[in-house]
Image (spheres, grey):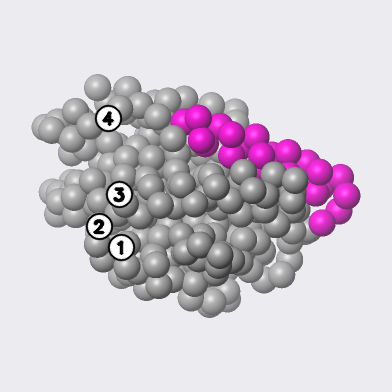
Amino acid sequence: MEEELRRAAFGDSPDRDVWAALSSSSSRVRWLAAVVLGGQGHYAAAATVLDALRHDPDPVIASLSLSTRASHHRQLGAHHLARPLDGAALARVRTTGGGDPDGIDADGARTDALLGLAADSLGAGRLDDARRLLARVETGSWRSEVRKGWVTAEVELASGHAHAAVAPAEEAYGVATSRKALRHELKSALVLGTALVVWGTPDGSTRGVELVECELNHSVTMGLHPLIWPSALVLVGHAPTVGAVAIDRATDALSCVLRRADPVSRQVALDSPWVPSGLLRSGEPPNADPQTNFLTD
């Protein structure tokens, strides 16, 4: 079962039905299932699993569970709720050790926690802190390389340096594609496409729109709702001809994600400037900046 769950979490089948895995006796399998559910936007179900696993006797699983829960908070705009979880995740890993192909080990857990803290700092506007945390990250797996590329690109975008965001985003996209890690590939295409269209060179803008439009279509097909609404917002801003369809997709996806979130997360998301909750109120424009404020790790 673990191999199937790895394929769903980090491979070519992110749309896999993993509900039965929640009853597994293996904490690693349950964590993998929670990762998949989060990628599909089932945040409340994932939270139930992760909140239990944060107390797991295996410090790696406990740490990874804390980091994953923090990541889901960030995806709903709750960076202030994510930060203490990432700090706790870092504190749980007191040993070193790698070798797992997907970074499900002590080194990978430490990297996830540091990247989470960097993203939390970014969300709070502390860009210098985010850069210092990124400098502490040592990538030992393909997944950590990809995620570091995402956060690095986000920091550059938030700093107004779109041109500097392209290279780390391109590297993340290349690594994820070579691994056939579909969900990571699609997220990387979104980050790279956004960097390119914000940078704004003619060739870059064309490629960026193509990347995001392709990514959006695949995310819709695979049911990866957390990727749908940010992708649609990029296209609304930079490909007006698909605006109406993109807004409909964004509204449907965001509504679906919020329905699947726990009550606290739902309210935080509705109040967050990072989440375009204006989409859910007829006649109002999105209340988030689609160029920088939706990218999450």
Callout 2 crowding tier (Cα within 10 Å): few <14, some 14–19, many ≥20: some
Q: Magenta stretch containing residue 205, yes or no?
A: yes
In the picture of the structure, the residue carrying the numbered disc 4 is: 18
x, y percent for residue 54 = 19, 54
Residue 201 placement, left or right of 71: right
Mark toward the start of the polypeptide (4 vs 2)? 4
- The residue type indicated by label 4 comes to Val
What amino acid does circle 3 point to? Arg
Q: Quadrant of residue 113?
A: bottom left
* Residue 15 visible from this viewpoint: yes
Marks 1 and 2 in Cβ contact (< 8 Å): yes
Question: Which region of the structure is painted magenta?
Answer: 200-222
Can you tell which of label 3 and label 4 is closer to the viewer? Answer: 3
Please tell me whether the stretch drawn in magenta is mainly helix, strand or loop: helix
Residue 92 image position (x, y, % from top left): 25, 59
CA distance separating discs 1 and 2: 5 Å
**Residue carrying label 1:** 265
Q: Are marks 3 and 4 in contact (CB under 8 Å)?
A: no
Q: Position of residue 48 (x, y in %)?
A: 18, 50
